[in-house]
Image (tube, grey):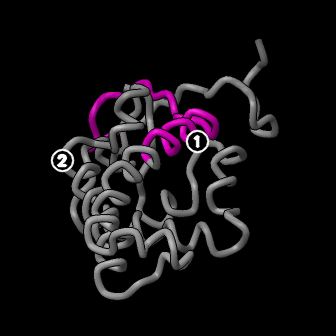
Amino acid sequence: MTVPNDSNPYAITPKADLQPDGGAGVNLRYAGFWIRVAASIIDTIAMMIIVFPLLFMIYGGDLLAQGNMSNGFWDVIISYVLPAVLSITLWVVFGGTPGKRLLGLRIVNEKTLQHLSWPVALVRYLGYYLSMLVLFLGFFWVAFDRKKKGWHDHLAGSIVIYD
């Protein structure tokens, strides 16, 4: 077992006392890098199960034969808009995507510890693109941040915690 410290990304995630809305302290355990990677893998598989059949229904065998997944309007809607709408809705309504919820994680507003609002969830989703921009450094940031926050979390004021 490793002892928690700020320089070890593999250390046990420390508990923190936060004061949401000026109330009593609440013990939190931040979700670290690897558990969030596992949740993302589950979410990616789930999204592929939704997206690929829809694209195949629209483009048929041409989808695979052309070798080019970018085929126009419906590809953009199904490959980009649908996942964004689903992710944002799941964050706001359920506090996380299926992968995060299956692994006992919850995405919350850092100040209130409540589910994200629609605007905050949108900022968090757009922050994913910023996190990807520089060799995915914004996602790897989770491994080294004291509160296990990626760039998208910092931008939106969100945290990912264990239920």
Where does residue 124 sit, x and y in percent of width and height? Answer: 41, 63
**Camera-side residue: 43 or 6?**
43
Quadrant placement of the C terminus: top left
Q: Amino acid at mark 2?
A: Val
Q: Position of residue 12 (x, y in %)?
A: 67, 23
Amino acid residing under circle 1: Val
List the residue tagged with mark 2.
93
Query: Residue 126 or 58: which is nearer the viewer?
Result: 58
In front: label 2 or label 1? 1
Q: Earlier in the sequence, mark 2 or mark 1?
A: 1
In the picture, measured across the screen, residue 84 lies left or right of residue 45, that is left
Residue picked out by circle 1: 37
Give the x, y percent position of residue 102: 37, 28
Q: Secondary structure at mark 1?
A: helix
Give the residues drawn in magenta, as a range.
20-43
* Residue extending farthest bottom: 72
Q: Residue at x 37, y 59 (%)?
A: 52
